[in-house]
Image (spheres, grey):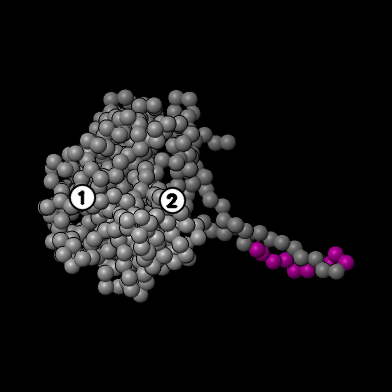
Amino acid sequence: MTSPERVKVVVIGAGQAGLSVAFYLRRFELVADEDFVMLDRAPGPGGAWQHRWSSLRLGTAHRVNDLPGMTELGLSFDTADRNLPAKEVVADYYSRFEEHFDLRVRRPMNVRQVVNAGVDLLVRYEDLAPQPLLEVQKEARGLFGRRRKTFEEPAAPVVPQHEIATQFLVNATGTWGSPFVPYYPGMTEFAGRHLHTSDFTDAEDFRDKHVVVVGGGTSAIGFMLELEDVAAGLTWVSRRPIDWLDRQELDLEGASAAVAMQDEAARSGRALPSIVSGTGVPRSRRISAGIERGLLVARPMFDRIEGDRVVWQGEDSGLARADVIIWATGFRPDLRHLAPLKLREKTGGVTVGQGAAWNDPRVFLAGYGPQASTIGASRAGRMIARQIMAML
């Protein structure tokens, strides 16, 4: 077996966190594909944004902060075209960023696992790019064993497997690949369709349908606003009361409180809390109008699902028809490939401080916990790159 490729650093993920780390590694004069390698599962640039629905605009989503160094390209999300889909703008800007700083991202590459290999870490991944089918010749025989003409049959495609040995690993896989859907009685017998935020593509898919939207964050609110004039029936439920804020944007105090909650959970190895639970939801003009006309009024969470309806018991007893249930219930960190390293604590999370996994100083988690926002990811990129350079 040939020896694996070897580099100083492997960065998994080319979203906001991964690109930020790579930018600072380049500033420290590390060369892509020689000193460090970037692996990304997505088919193109744009991180998780490339998978979002086409109707989402930058002005209606969480603010997207600029990556470090974007000013060199004359780009800023603050001045980006608000009429274009956010997924297109982010993909375009990230693509130009990768090219300008010569990051040489390898994609689409799926990291299957990271294992200990003595002093190094061994990253095992597969190339998801379409591969040519192998032609297998077969020979057909007629009666009495006489040969007939041969024919060719395509065999199953072979997915190329690769390995890289590295001194340090930066995991920047985010959460998009790990959607979370809570269990409720009757889910498996639901006569309609379950859909998660990550599966939503177009409001027209729900024309004349009875839709139940589950969730208390900005995604759930966005779905309610988009489906208002499309769905035949629309019901909004939330597992917790909505904390409406009497301002149009999240202020520094609210953002700092949410970051502090995430940081405390990460340092103690607990499962990360919801961002919205620590910040509340600002009442933009569009949201305020939806509240005033009675659209954005959330019911408590239903108790169970029965056939083609959701059912409430007790004081809120009742039911609502459901052809589709959209679960805008968030995501969890996508860390399955790190399982062989045994970083996860019994309390449900990974103990992380200053971007580093406390159980393995070779592993850094960019965009985890308090670094999950675009501005947090940018700051984490500099912090992580500095720590790596100090240990090289």
Vertical placement of 58 versus 15: above or below?
Answer: below
Residue type pointed to by label 2: Tyr
Please give the name of the residue rendered at 39% of the width and 68% of the height, measured from the top-left corner: 321
Q: Which residue is mark 2?
A: 183
Across and down, in percent, residue 37 comes to: 37, 40
Per the rendering, the mark at residue 328 is: none
Residue that protrudes farthest toward the right in the picture:
144
Residue 126: within the magenta?
Answer: no
Q: Quadrant of residue 288?
A: bottom left
Please give the name of the residue rendered at 58% of the width and 36% of the height, measured from the top-left corner: 1
Q: Taking 205 as reference, is 245 left or right? A: left
Across and down, in percent, residue 72 comes to: 17, 47
Camera-nearest residue between 114 and 215: 215
Q: Which residue is mark 1?
A: 243
Q: Taking 298 as reference, is 201 left or right? A: right
Residue 319 visible to the viewer: yes
Q: Taking 112 as reference, is 68 left or right? A: left
Magenta-drawn segment? 144-153
